[in-house]
Image (cartoon, coloured by chain):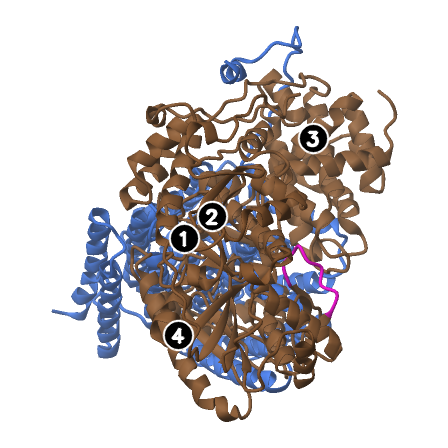
Chain colours: A blue, B brown
Amino acid sequence: MTSAQLLLLSPLPLAALVLETAGRRWTTTRSCSLALAAGIVAMLGLASCASTGQQHPSSALVRITWLGLVVDLSALVVGLTVLSYARRNLAFDPSGRRFASATALVLGGTIVATSGARLSVLCLGWVLTSIGAVAAFAGGGTRRTRNRMALVLGLGDLALLLALGILWWACGDASLSSLAGTEHALNHHVLTLGPIGVHLGAVVAVLMVLAVAARAGQAPLPGWLPSTVEASTPTSALLHAGVVNAGGYLLVVATPLTVASRAGDALLIAIASLSVVLGAAAARHRPDRKGQLAISTVAQMGFMLLSIGVGAPAVAIAHLVGHAQYKSSRFLGAGGAVELATTERRFARPASLGQVPAMASALVSGAIAAAGAWWVLGPAASRADHVLGAGASFMIAATATWAVLAGGAQGSLRRRLLGAVVVGVGVDALLSRAIAESTSLHLGTTGVSLAAGLGALAVLGIAVHVGGRVPATAPVVTASLAGFQAPIGTVAVPRRTPARPTSRLEVPPARAEVLA
Amino acid sequence: MTTLSTSTLRIDVATAARVIAPLWPLENVIAVNPLLSSLDLPFHHAIGAASTWLAARGYPDAAIVQRSLELGQMSRVDLEVAAASLGTTAEVLDQPRARVAPRRLRGAAERADALAGTALAPAVDAVVAWWCAQLVGSASFHTPNRGIWRSFTTLAPHDRATRKLVGRKSSLWAALAPDPEHSLVLLVERLGLEDTTILDELTGQLARLPGWSGFARYCSEWRPADATGPSITLTELLAIRLCLEVGALEAAGLLGTGFNRLMEPPVRDLAGEVALVALERGYRRQLLAKLDGSVSSTHGVAAQVVCCIDVRSEGLRRHLEDIGPYATVGAAGFFGFPFNLTHAGAAEPYPSAPVLLNPAITLAETAEAPRTLRAPGPQRATVAASVETTTHHPAAMFPAAQVAGWWLGPLALLRSAAPSLLPPTASNHGGTLDLGVLSDEEQAAIVEGALRSMSLTDSFAPLVVVLGHGSSSVANAHGTSLDCGACGGHPGAPNARALVAAANNPAVRVLLSARGVVIPPTTLFVAGIHDTTTDVVTLFTEGDLGAHHHAVETLRQDLLTAGAANAAERSHAFSSGLDPRARSRDWAEPCPEWGLVGNASFIIGPRSMTQGVNLERRAFLHSYDPELDPSGSILETILTAPVVVAQWINAQYYFSTTDPELFGAGDKTLHNPIANVGVLEGVGGDLKVGLPRQSLFEGDVAIHTPQRLLCVIEAPEERIDAVIARNPILRQLFDGGWVHLTARTSPQERFKHRIAPTRWVDDPDLPENAAPLPATDPTNP
């Protein structure tokens, strides 16, 4: 049996899990062990494929890459964490079983998507994950939010399928390793709409970027992500197992179709920058813990997409993995926010993060330095983008070190934290480096990306600097603009002016029933 | 319509607030009787009154009756007798129960809705709740010196949802005054109400959002004046609410429409009353049958262990007495020593005392602050602040998430998949307290009061252990609801330490012997803490214990053995049977322990009354020796403080079970914390009150049996009657049927039941002894 075939077996335990949870009382350890088995089989398959360095024939449906492995592993860790959490957390919840099946669907979809050698297989996995996400939410949330979520995700998936269709029509079922060629083929076709002629390549790029943006809950599109905190805690955490963040993987493996196109890149940078600024501002002023976490995901995903847009895919993938772990963990521990807030208040130490503008300068100057180095070295070294990907990531991590240490840490705490952060940064840099090595991809027109990227980072920097000084109304306005005030949307406000009643004692039928 | 004055309106606001009970923040959950303001009414009337504004379901439902029958907590005979005493038959239980709906229209918007078929009131609710969360929960949202009201009037006109509600060009904003009180006057006038209906209007408005109204009532009436942290007053809440409601009504062209009163005839839930009385009868019958023996052996006692009255202490005490020559004593968990506590390294003190007391003294810890990240302390506070700032600041949030993720992901997997591999949950039980602010004389007075209140004034054992209690759970928003209620929702270790420090002070002992409490020099006091989640007992000993070393070590072992036995017993109370010790470190566990579930009785008497009897962790146990209290003053202290607190707890568990939607905090898996104030269920909506569903239910099955507290006292009836007669709060509780009272003068006599002031009978279930029925609806004069 070849490794690729072994990999195809991995969804089997997940399917068994679906059957298992459908039939029995679900508080058994069996569902967890099945999911664990799925993970182990998948990992073994992936690892053995990767270690043998197997060459994939161009006709293969499945391929193994380190990139896919990294994204898979991240999703599986989140998925297993969520499942074993839900086993006790949702033990008496009627939706628990359904949630386990939906988790299997999400994970299965992510595994299929990340191991597909063709765009069509990737899209299949992508759609499976979307369905799983909506199914997971539907167990606990309101119908209204579920419909909104299904609509946004469905339209995004439709855009992706449309892009796939165009590509198929133009070049057949494209293999992911030969996308650079298809891009040229696509650009032979020009779509004429009256006086405007558009290259098909641009249409495909825009469609794919829209698909990714929809899944990542990006700002100008209707926001579905903040309202998902209506559902149970594990559901919110599950969204980080390849639902909101799979777009990072898609854009990186399909770079020739997306970021390489000017239209696609510009749209990506515009959407991502807007999300970063609006998301960061709105998350800060959100009062509820889970709402903060969900909206900050919008900003974080914006950052990930922005990294791809400005040509640092390694940063994006490192962020995809790190943030998935971070955010799912924060969601699962959301109940602890009360104790932390109490401790923080009762044992208040003057917060010495007063040097925040300095931190902002550090980030902006770091970004400018990274971009400058890239600009100087980029054309010279063919693999410069990988090295710089790791370098930029390291620089960002160093900024984080600074931020944590500036947070008023003192004494032995500072030393311990420093140790943790140094190790964390080291791991981060090593993994980023490994990720960078695995993504040997064409990075598009440097000039456009660089200009746009610097512009976006400047916007971010300005937002940061002004952050403390904006008029108090700004967060309300931005939150309103970004549609982040979901809770109020649940109530329909009547706009019609009813006719004045003739008698003051007239009782409408509904009320009269109560009275009777 | 006359011009309103702010002072009359202030009275109306305070009166209107009586419709809901105050809601303490989650920082220190206090169990409150949800019908606190109706204590002046008899129990059944109070439930009727609550249905006027709140549509409360106040009685056990059929499922609870069914489960109690299956468990043998009561029998069919109990149901028959209960029905007969209420002048009906048990068949009434099979009839469909009356639907409950508020009997009045709550506020102008609801009246307009009833008239015009619109849905303005829910829309106003949603927006008001959102603004409350926003203004209270988001600290950076408004600067402290600007206040809630100014923030609201500055921000609200720019908010899309608010504009959708009140219209884009509302003239309202310009008409508002800069302070909430005058604005409220203006808004009430704008509603065009007659003077007589203003109180009803405000009451209705508050009743639409019981959670936020309850928190506002807490802030207005109970919150210490110098407290920091989030708050909102009743006036501010009402001004915001009326502002949005008037705006919405004006925008819809419905201002001034509607009629004021829609009354349904009061519905008496006879089936519910039968179920409740039967449950109480069944429990009383079985309890009193167990209490007929009297075991007493004070000879050769190696140690006396003083525990909190909490029902969870009962199991530990029983198992400890089974193991060795130990005597246990029950006393309120603050051990008669109320104070404000400043933890080592803390910035502000908190009251470690029952909420009914206002401690005059502040004690500080002499020890160094804990240098651990896991227990509450300065280090944890610093990390929390750093994490909060770093993950919220736009410059830091992206790299911070990325770097932290590599750590948090695998840790989360470990915490979820194998919580038993984690180290035990750490709590801050504090260190030695500095009693220097109290003179020896004052300390002696406190120790004397404490010992006398627990009737422990002679025959001291060589070792006297004072055990506070606390709980340990992780990622639990309602964690403090499992801590000691007598310590204001905090662990009781500091109070135990304080009492022990004073009692071990030689100078204090000299003064004590002058006061008639002679503690032999060979007696050592030791403080400890009982972790009610894990049933691990820790004794705090320092330095060389000398001759007591062996006794302390033996007791330490025996306490651990007793705790393990209790934990094993408790694990049967979970259908999954998981070890309670694993639950305390499991962040996925919505029910780390059952808390005070099942609480049903309050027994005041010597331990010989209950020794060797399995009370199934359903009884509060307060030690009391009637011989030592001829004047009844000790009994008076017990009845007016611990019994009142126990009644609040009992009522909270009761109503969170009978009406989980209105008086319960909802599903824990959906909880969404607002700072340390409270939780929302999912996204938006009202602040949740009471206990979470998972604290009382397993799935749809109520584990708690809702019944009123049964107070069992061993003391002469005349003494009890005299104490009740001179305390209005006791007259309300006992004469109003909030707490049942049963007593016997001595172990040789039969229990008698108090059914009316000074009227004691042998059988309270005879129809002629039943509580008088409500003649008229007290809420509808």
Is residue A196 one of those drawn in magenta?
no
What residue type is disc 2 on? Thr
Are the numbered discs 3 and 4 placed on the same chain, yes or no? Answer: yes
Observer-nearest of A372 and A51: A51
Determine the CA span between mark 3 and mark 2: 28 Å
Residue found at x 43% / y 31% = B272
What residue type is disc 4 on? Leu
> From which residue to which does the magenta span run?
B353-361
What residue type is disc 3 on? Glu
Residue found at x 51% / y 17% = A510
Residue bearing the label numbered 1: A235
Determine the CA span between mark 1 and mark 2: 8 Å
Residue found at x 40% / y 61% = B588
Q: Quadrant of the image for the N terminus of chain A?
A: bottom left
Determine the CA span between mark 3 and mark 1: 35 Å
Observer-nearest of B468 and A206: B468
Residue bearing the label numbered 3: B245
Mark closest to the chain's N terminus, 1 or 2? 2
Chain of the residue under label 2: A
Residue bearing the label numbered 4: B422
In the displayed structure, does residue B169 sit left or right of residue B18? right
Q: Secondary structure at mark 4?
A: loop
Residue bearing the label numbered 2: A228
Observer-nearest of B331 and B293: B293
- Asked if the residue under mark 2 is in contact with the one under mark 3, i.e. CB atoms within 8 Å, the reply is no
- Asked if the residue under mark 2 is in contact with the one under mark 1, i.e. CB atoms within 8 Å, the reply is yes
Query: Is the residue B584 above or below the residue A216 in the image?
Result: below
Chain of the residue under label 3: B
Determine the CA span between mark 1 and mark 4: 24 Å
In x, y percent, where is residue A305? 50, 60
In x, y percent, where is residue B465? 51, 76
